[in-house]
Image: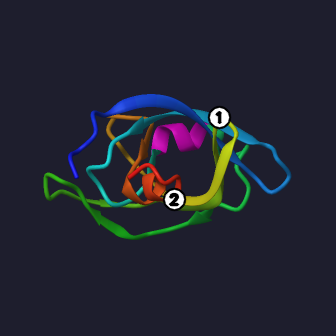
Amino acid sequence: MSKSVPFTHPIMLKNMDNTGATVKALFDDGAMTGAMALSTFNMIKHELKGWQPLSQALCMANRAVILSEATWMGMINIEGMEVTGTFEVFDSAGGWVFLFRKPLLQAFKAA
């Protein structure tokens, strides 16, 4: 399978009561976990229900180890199509807002 070209597209993160938040996600099948930038999470966490604090070490592509701050599981909606998904929150150092990665692509049958 060839790698897809990264692109951005809005996604809706939905709570059980259909409230939630919309973020612009970077779609890229290069990593193994969905992730939200800590700066974005801090702006919208009051809109997301069910997030949990998390202290887990994540190894980045450049071999840097970064601690995850939180995790969230809920419905992810893209233009009316929904799946249950999860992501972790960590400091992206301004590199991105939300990474839509391989497990989420597979859940949407896009990888």
Q: How many labels does the image show?
A: 2
- The x and y percentages for residue 24 are 51, 31
Per the picture, the main secondary structure of the magenta-coloured stretch is helix
| Residue under the image location 35 percent in, 42 percent down | 92
Circle 1 is placed at which residue position?
A: 79
Residue 26 versus residue 36 in the image, above or below? above
Is residue 41 rendered magenta in the image? Answer: yes
**Residue in the foreground of this view, choosing between 67 and 98:** 98
Q: Do the residues labelled 1 and 2 touch (CB within 8 Å)?
A: no
What distance separates the C-alpha of mark 1 from that of mark 2?
A: 15 Å
| Residue under the image location 72 percent in, 45 percent down | 46
- The x and y percentages for residue 54 are 50, 68
**Residue in the foreground of this view, choosing between 46 and 14:** 14
Circle 2 is placed at which residue position?
A: 107
- The x and y percentages for residue 96 are 37, 35
Residue range of the region highlighted in magenta in the rendering: 38-43
Q: Counting other residues with Cα less than 10 Å from the Cα at mark 2, is it few (<14), some (14-19), or many (20 or more)?
A: few
Q: Counting other residues with Cα less than 10 Å from the Cα at mark 1, is it few (<14), some (14-19), or many (20 or more)?
A: few
